[in-house]
Amino acid sequence: MKSVRVVEILRELEAVPSPSGLTGEIVALLERRLKAQGFRPRVTNKGALLLAEHPKPYAVVAGHIDTLGAMVSRVESDGTLRVAMIGGYPLPSFEGEYVSVRTAAGKTLRGTFLFDNPAAHVNKDVGKTERTLDNMHVRLDAETSSSKETGKLAVGVGDYVCFDPRFEVTDTGFVKSRFLDDKAGSAAMLEVIERLAPKLKDLPVAFFFSNYEEVGHGAPAGFPPSAREVLVVDMGVIGKSVAGKETAVSICAKDSSGPQDYELRCRLAGLAKKKRIPFVVDVFPYYSSDAAMALQAGLDLRPGIIGPGVSASHGVERTHLKGLKATADLLEAYIRDLPSWNRTIGK
């Protein structure tokens, strides 16, 4: 493999829990990284991060650093915790996952997300019952058996529940982790920023890391007013009846919000062919992104979406180094091509 830099960046991002609404720590990490490279990032009022070295960027490259998660909604009489979802995900995929509960008092407690009465030796229907938020709970790793005892631990309603990512890189090039949506895309963005560091002031591009994408309002504001395109770097879809694969970058033609910009999509495919970057053009049936959020907010932008193919999205996800590299390579080619394309605007 030619490049593993993107994987090391991804490992660093995955180590920082960042469910929607609890993204200050990872935004601060990005801010430190970029400032150490001599850049001048800016945190928006809403808590997203914008890097715009060019005075009038024509394009915004957007990824999101928020993830799925949960929030304590009730402390039960037996001391366990009911939760509300942050984002949407299949509960069976998260059953049995280890978690960290972040309290408002600044403490972190460990626990496990479980089905109620989960022991097969006492519950003959444990494998048959549908999982819902009403029959799942967080079991804290603390000696508590009542709401009063849990209260003494400073755990309460509104505290965040962060699922462990379980990041792993195999010797066959696969990258397995929760939250590759969209820390994989964000890692590709950061690698490309490093690659282009000496030239960024001359390239008409800005980078936007949004912090509320998983809950539907990640990028309706905060873009430079000069922007005319938004290229979202998110995950590519893998599954039955779609074309995506882990070893390639997906170029989205249409998601559930509607078609992406046709000229931009063709431009991306042309660059991929020219640079011999493995890619697929695909339709994502149940998918929305920061591109849709920006357009729904009324921003006058041409939208596009690319990203590495991610298996088992919103579950126990997996991609491949080849897909990560293809995404970074296509993103770099797109940005390098912007000056020549920008000159044609208005002609």
Image (tube, rainbow, N blue to C red):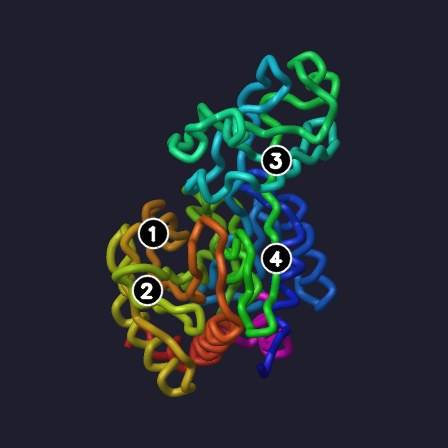
Using the image, determine if residue 167 lies above or below residue 281: above
Q: Give the amino acid at mark 1.
A: Tyr
Label 4 or label 3, whichever lies nearer to me, is: 3
Residue receiving disc 1:
287
Residue indicated by mark 2: 252
Q: Amino acid at mark 4?
A: Phe
Q: Earlier in the sequence, mark 1 or mark 4?
A: 4
Q: Secondary structure at mark 2?
A: strand
The main secondary structure of the magenta stretch is helix
Query: Do residues under tags 2 and 4 come within 8 Å of each other at their CB atoms?
Result: no
The CA distance from mark 1 to mark 2 is 10 Å
Q: Quadrant of the C terminus?
A: bottom left
Q: Amino acid at mark 2?
A: Cys
Q: Earlier in the sequence, mark 4 or mark 3?
A: 3
CB contact under 8 Å: marks 4 and 3: no
Q: Distance of mark 1 from mark 3, alpha carbons?
A: 29 Å
For marks 2 and 4 on the same chain, the one whose residue lies earlier in the sequence: 4
Q: Is residue 80 visible?
A: yes
Labels 1 and 3 touching (C-beta < 8 A): no
Q: Is residue 112 located in the magenta-colored stretch of the structure?
A: no
Mark 3 secondary-structure assignment: strand
Numbered badge on residue 112? 3
Label 4 secondary element: loop
10, 142: nearer the viewer: 142
Q: Which residues are magenta?
A: 190-204
Label 4 sits on residue: 167
Spatial separation of the CA atoms under disc 2 and disc 3: 36 Å
Visible in this render: residue 83? no
